[in-house]
Amino acid sequence: MKSTDRMDIKNERLKFERHLKEKGLRLTTGRQIVFDEVMHAHGHFAPEELVKQCHQNKRRVSRATIYRSINELLEAGVIRKTAFGEKHQHFEHIYDEKPHHHAKCLHCGSYIEFPDLGEDKVYKPYLEKEGFQVIGHEMHFYGICRKCQ
Amino acid sequence: MKSTDRMDIKNERLKFERHLKEKGLRLTTGRQIVFDEVMHAHGHFAPEELVKQCHQNKRRVSRATIYRSINELLEAGVIRKTAFGEKHQHFEHIYDEKPHHHAKCLHCGSYIEFPDLGEDKVYKPYLEKEGFQVIGHEMHFYGICRKCQ
DNA sequence: CTAAAGATGATACACTATCTCATATGAAGT
DNA sequence: ACTTCATATGAGATAGTGTATCATCTTTAG
């Protein structure tokens, strides 16, 4: 773990607390557990994976609380959706990560990440001209990964 | 309906038939119905919407057949997935459409389309250097649409 | 006309996510 | 500490989407 990571996590924690305060919600044990597990999830995760992970780590949180907390983390901007045509939701935490996109292998389902090169900003003026206020974007590539060729 | 549309649909039909033949499947009444309804769906559609649409139009096809046919249409390259973080699958037909992407309003859920400007091709060399064979890509913008501001 | 391959529909099933509601918990005031 | 009240939680019910099963029907080939 890099020396900066603890700072990053602390930052995310503050973001989360701020969000909860704004909504008049409490930072409870359950929410802390979910926060921690999310931060220690390796990159991407699906809610059900997190449920299993919590169960394995003997964290006592119900599925309902996990789902609810994930939504708060999402609203707080600590995690984001990375949907990719799957039948379930998919998230990743934002801390420690540089802007990047994903390429998914249609054969084995694995994905690789690649940096945001910024070219997509060309689209922004176009959308703004249409009156659309851009908040964010994702790029999804799909194809065949090195191993599956 | 433009004069070219009938040609386009015919083309898609041929594509579909070719695919079925390759797999040793038949172009049955059920599959024709689904093909027609998909072609006449206004742009995007979710499977369940198509089920309702068929029902309203008094087309006698079961949900199972609809889902199965959608998958064949997908494999045939007549439609494509346009997942956008929803909890259900989402498709659009390809005929008559120029390469484009989607921007979704986080408030009302509506989306607008905008043309593919081709900038994303900058990413291709990068991915190929990683040994990833690119088949396609999508860009997803999200934000607030004109009406919701 | 028959046999074999394939297609269909009704239903059961699996999975994900949300909702409900009774109970538990935490914060603030006394 | 004690009480009060808003908020949080867990267990289970529920909703929604998509897939699997299997008996029955249809098409095609011979």
Image (spheres, coloured by chain):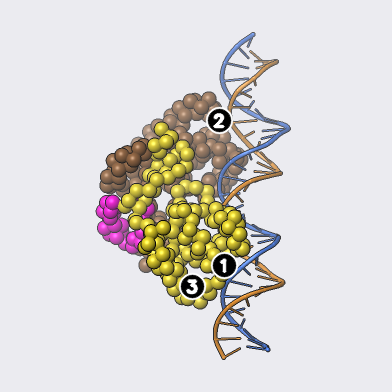
Chain colours: A brown, B yellow, C blue, D orange
Amino acid type indicated by mark 1: Gly
Q: Which residue is mark 1?
A: B30
Query: Which residue position is annotated with label 3?
Result: B20
Image position, residue C4 (x, y; %): 61, 83
Give the residue displayed 37% in from the left and 67% down from the top.
A149
Mark 1 touching mark 3, by CB under 8 A?
no
- Give the chain letter at badge 1: B
**Image quadrant containing the C terminus of chain B:** top left
Task: Measure how far apart labels 2 and 1 are at the Cα level.
Answer: 54 Å
Query: Of tags 3 and 2, which is closer to the observer?
Result: 3
Q: Position of residue A98 (x, y in %)?
A: 33, 43
Provide the chain ID for the residue under circle 3: B
Q: In which quadrant of the rendered view does residue A128 lie?
A: top left
Task: Inspect this view and state whether residue B67 appears.
Answer: yes
Q: Amino acid at mark 2?
A: Thr
Boundaries of the magenta span:
B117-139
Report the amino acid beneath label 3. Leu
Task: Decide which of A112, B16 is in the foreground and name it.
Answer: B16
Structural distance between the alpha carbons of marks 1 and 3: 13 Å
